[in-house]
Image (cartoon, rainbow, N blue to C red):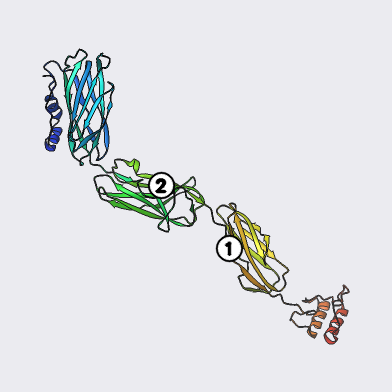
Amino acid sequence: MNGSKKGMKMGMGILLFAVMLGILPAMIVAIHPAGIEAQTTEVSIQNATASVNKTVEIPIDIMNVTDLGATTIWLSYDSSVVTVEEVREGTLGSLAVGINNTAGVTKMSWFSMTGTGKTGDFVFAYVTLKAVGSPGEASILDLNVKTMVNSRNEPINYTVRDGIFSISEVHDINITTDYKGACNGIKITRDGTDIVGCEENLSTGEVYKIRYKLVNEGDFDETVNMTITVYNETISETIGTPTHSLKAGESDTYYVEWDTEGLAPGTYTIKVEASIPDDADPTDNIRTRDLVFADTKGPEIAFIEPTPPDGANLTVNYVNVTIRVTDKSGVCTVLLNWNGENETMNAIAPEIYSVNKTGLTAGTYTFKVYANDTLNNWNMSETRSVIVSVPQKKIGDMNGDGEVTFDDVIALAKHIYFGDSVHDDPDVNGDDAVTFDDVILLAKHIYFGDPIYP
């Protein structure tokens, strides 16, 4: 016989039973007799497996051939299970190819363009197969050698070893990039609906939603464990670890909230990662997106003690204004606006600035603080007002009771003779000496109105 054979299709039950018994190769070879002489050349195709809608490339080999001048080989298959997407030439060289997936036959021919035969082991063709059926289905890859001759156009004896294509059942989760408004599969929104563009900066202190879309591309219902993290060179923080359930073939969108309060300005990376056991393609389970948080806020300003509260009534002639100023980018300038005039506040400790306003007369004083950061973002404190009521000391009030009476004469005398303290200048007559003459002048001031402290 010359290598002709009948096409064969096997039912799944017979096919799998034959595979389990290990007798299929013998059956396949048995129905491909190539002649009664010794068969030394083998034409074979590998077994292949792919998941639904996935492709795989496998070779058709011609092994141990002598002086091969030309050959035509047909590949038959169940096109409801598998189709041929592409045929590439192998090591023999150029092929003439005709693909007919409707009929389930791909025809391939090769001949020596130089007239010199090929001897050795060769790849006749590389065939790309696509799984189009359902998980668990299979098809015989049936090789039919129509012609195999040497350079003298004489038949070459051969054997044929067919293959099997099977569609695998897989676990496969994908964080899809096919998600409107997303950048590399990650969408960020503020206020629930406002989408942050791929090149748009974010602002610290806001709450964002990190959104993603999961697709179950496998053949099983899955429980998907998620990990959403944010990191840069200095920090790594887990935002959320939710769990989702997806049926086979199902897709859905999800989100976690991200409060950026306390986050320093800078560049960060968001990573969204999905995991299931035995995932067939974990490479599409991780998506990342780079983010820039720009500092657009001025420093935080807070009055601290001993700054008087707003509306305070003071009986001293000074006001101390002390304030804490903080900013993630660093504080640059701090100004006290006192009754409409600005002056620089001095740093007395880290983040603490102070000015002491002294020698104040009675009246109302209004003040506030301005500050900017190293990026020239400004902020302003609240405005405070205080009332200064400096008590007017009565001249000659030696005992400090607010009145000038003969009791003050006695107090001044005790100061001179016994050293008792007084609340006013005891040199009443201004002669730079404190004597009994001062007592006499104070008495005359009280009783006769004589002036004192000339």
Q: In percent of the image, x 60 and y 64: which residue is there? A: 304
Query: Is residue 316 or residue 429 the one in the foreground?
Result: 316
| Residue farthest toward the bottom in the current orientation of the protein | 447
Residue 437 spot, x, y in % from top left: 88, 79
Query: Which quadrant, please, contains the N terminus?
Result: top left
Give the structural element (helix, strand or loop) at label 2: loop
Q: In percent of the image, x 27 and y 36: which residue is there? A: 55
On the rendered structure, is 417 left or right of 315?
Answer: right
Q: Which amino acid type is shown beneath numbered disc 2?
A: Cys
Task: Count all numbered tags in the image, as a single digit.
Answer: 2
On the rendered structure, is 68 left or right of 384?
Answer: left
Query: Is residue 446 or residue 160 the one in the foreground?
Result: 160
Query: Is residue 136 or residue 235 the one in the foreground?
Result: 136
Q: In percent of the image, x 21 and y 36: which residue is there? A: 82
Query: Is residue 172 or residue 8 the one in the foreground?
Result: 8
Q: Which amino acid type is shown beneath numbered disc 1?
A: Ala
Residue 26 spot, x, y in % from top left: 13, 26
**For residue 315, which quarter of the picture?**
bottom right
On the rendered structure, is 204 left or right of 7?
Answer: right
Q: Mark 2 — residue?
A: 183
Residue 123 spot, x, y in % from top left: 26, 23
Give the structural element (helix, strand or loop) at label 1: strand
Q: CA distance from mark 2 to mark 1?
A: 40 Å
- Callout 1: few (<14), some (14-19), or many (20+) C-alpha neighbours within 10 Å? some
Instruction: Decide if residue 351 is in sight here.
Output: no
**For residue 364, which quarter of the picture?**
bottom right
Q: Mark 1 — residue?
A: 302
- Callout 2: few (<14), some (14-19), or many (20+) C-alpha neighbours within 10 Å? many
Query: Which quadrant, please, contains the C terminus?
Result: bottom right
Q: Name the mark nearer the viewer: 2 or 1.
A: 2
Q: Earlier in the sequence, mark 2 or mark 1?
A: 2
Q: In percent of the image, x 58 and y 55: which residue is there? A: 377
